[in-house]
Image: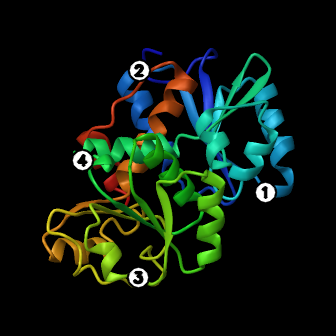
Amino acid sequence: MSDGAPTGAARVAGVTGWPVEHSLSPRLHGFWLRRHGVDGVYAPFPVAAAAFETAIRGLAAAGLSGVNVTVPHKRRAFEIADELDAAARAIGAVNTLVFRDGRILGRNTDAPGFMANLRQHGVDPAVGPVTVMGAGGAARAALHALVQAGAPDIRLVNRTPESARKLAEEFGNTAITVQPYPVSQAVLSDTALLVNTTSLGMTGQAALDIDLTPLPAQAVVHDIVYVPLETPLLAAARGRGLKTVDGLGMLLHQAAPAFEAFYGVRPEVDAALRRHLLEVL
C-alpha cells in the first residue's frame, strides 16, 4: 500500500445505521487508517431495519472484519450476535459487531468509551456522588461504566420516573437510587459528577432544564451530546466556573477498541484526532 491505496488484501469494515450519512465514524476511522498505514477500508452501510439481519450476515459472508452499529440497530445487533461481551449483556445493546471464524461477536464499547473520556479529563467517578440524567440507552452504558468503576453513590433522574426505576432494577445494584424529577437541590448539593445522557441540548432539541446553582464548586459536568460541542448545560457550567467534559471524547474513545478489533492496531485518542473531527462539527 505504498501509494496509500488499499490492496486486494485490505481489511474492510464500516458503520451501519438508518440513516448513516451523518456518521462521523468514516472520518474518524479513516484518520487512524492513514496514521497507522493500515491496508484497510472503512465505509458506511445504510441498512433499513427490515433488512438488518440479512445485510449483516451478507457482510460477514463477504469477508468484512466487522461493523459499528448505530441507530436504530443496536438492539437487533444484540439479538443476532452469536456471542456477547460483558458490557453488551449488561447494557442490552451492541454497537460493534466483529466477524470472526464464521461467528458474529457482539460488543458494546460505549461504556468503556464513556469511562475513558472521563479518565482522560482526570475525572474519577469513585470520589463522590454521581447524578445521571436520563434512562435510555446512553444511560445504560453510563451506569454500567460507573458501576464497574466503583462509583459508590449513583443518583438516577428521569422525566419518567418509572423508566428510571425499571432501569435501576435491571442493574440490581444498591449503589443506584432513583431520585425525583426535576432534580432537587438536595441531590445536587453534594454531587461530584453530573452526567446528561439525554438528547436535550442537542441541536434542534430543547435545553436540559436544570439549575446548576446548588452544585459544589469542585463538581464536574459532563454532557454526552457533541452537536453542538458546547451545549447549554456545559455553557451554564462554565459560567459557574465548573469543570466540564463534552461528548466528543466519548465518541472517539468508543471507536478505539472497535478499530483494534477490525484492523489489529490499537489507535490513540489525542488532540490531532480531536481537531480532525472538529473540522466538520
N-terminal-most mark, 4 or 3: 4
Q: Of 86 and 178, which appears nearest the observer?
A: 178
N-terminal-most mark, 1 or 4: 1
> Which element type, helix, strand or loop, lies under badge 1?
loop
Residue in the picture at 29% in, 42% down = 119
Q: Nearer the viewer, mark 1 or mark 4?
A: 4
Q: Position of residue 22 (x, y in %)?
A: 54, 59
**In the rendering, which numbered label is found on residue 69?**
none
Q: Which residue is mark 2?
A: 37
N-terminal-most mark, 3 or 1: 1
**What residue type is disc 4 on?**
His
**In the rendering, which numbered label is found on residue 121?**
4
Does residue 185 appear left or right of residue 42 in this picture?
left
Does residue 171 appear left or right of residue 203 in this picture?
right
**What residue type is disc 2 on?**
Gly
Q: Which residue is mark 3?
A: 207
Label 1 – label 2 distance at C-alpha: 33 Å
